[in-house]
Image (cartoon, rainbow, N blue to C red):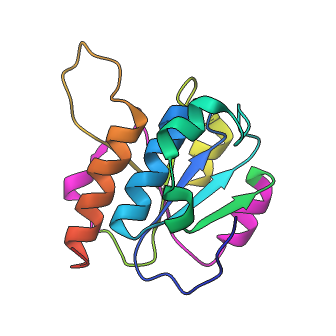
Amino acid sequence: MTHNSTILGPKIALYEPDIPQNTAAIIRTCACLGAKLEIIEPCGFLLSDKRFKRVVMDYMDHSRIEFYQSSEKFFEAKKKGRIVLMTTRGSANYTKFKFMPDDTILFGRESAGVPDKVHRLIKNRLKIPMKNELRSLNIASSVAIVLAESLRQIKLI
């Protein structure tokens, strides 16, 4: 399902998501906050997966989703825009970053993040600060945190 309407505000992109329940929760978050979701394939599951359907419910009907067949097609489409990578390897705190209305905020796979080649392509690499002894937040929680901050900064919420 792809909707080609003009989107005001940041977009969330998922790099080859592999947990259906997380992707479904992110779809719900994006639908509720009015953000477009971009999914870079391949996904590690089918959209017909019952775990996905149980969480997404009817929010697919309220979502703006665009699928990219590969990371190459995604980066080709984003040549003129700014991509912000959320990563545990980021050096800058997301709250100190100035989000812009047309940013694409990219999140990696739950199981592996993004490959080094993607890290090298993206200048803006941010993190959510957390306790040092812990590995990472759930991706759906991370999307909600960062999307809400970007929307607050650009005054869309």
Q: How many marks do you count on the picture?
A: 0
Q: Is residue 108 visible?
A: no
Location of the N terminus by quadrant is bottom right
User: Along the line of sight, which residue is nearer the eye, 52 or 78?
Assistant: 52
**Residue at x 43% of width, y 68% of height:** 35
Please indicate whether residue 108 sits to the left or right of residue 137 in the image. right
User: Along the line of sight, which residue is nearer the eye, 88 or 46?
Assistant: 46
Please indicate whether residue 81 sits to the left or right of residue 77 in the image. left
Decide whether residue 92 is among the magenta residues.
yes
**Which residues fall within the magenta stretch?**
72-98
Decide whether residue 123 is among the magenta residues.
no
**Residue at x 77% of width, y 41% of height:** 42
Q: Position of residue 112 (x, y in %)?
A: 58, 25
Q: Is residue 119 visible?
A: yes
Residue 74: quarter of image: bottom right
Q: Position of residue 69 (x, y in %)?
A: 81, 54
Q: Position of residue 71 (x, y in %)?
A: 74, 51
Location of the C terminus by quadrant is bottom left
Q: Is residue 124 above or below residue 132?
A: below
Q: Is residue 8 above or below residue 37?
A: below
**Residue at x 23% of width, y 60% of height:** 149
Q: Position of residue 18 (x, y in %)?
A: 63, 31
User: Along the line of sight, which residue is nearer the eye, 124 or 35?
Assistant: 35
Q: Residue furthest bottom?
A: 6
**Residue at x 27% of width, y 16% of height:** 134
Q: Is residue 143 above or below residue 52?
A: below
Q: Is residue 37 above or below residue 153?
A: above
Please indicate whether residue 100 sits to the left or right of residue 116 in the image. left
Please indicate whether residue 54 sits to the left or right of residue 2 in the image. left
Q: Residue furthest top?
A: 133
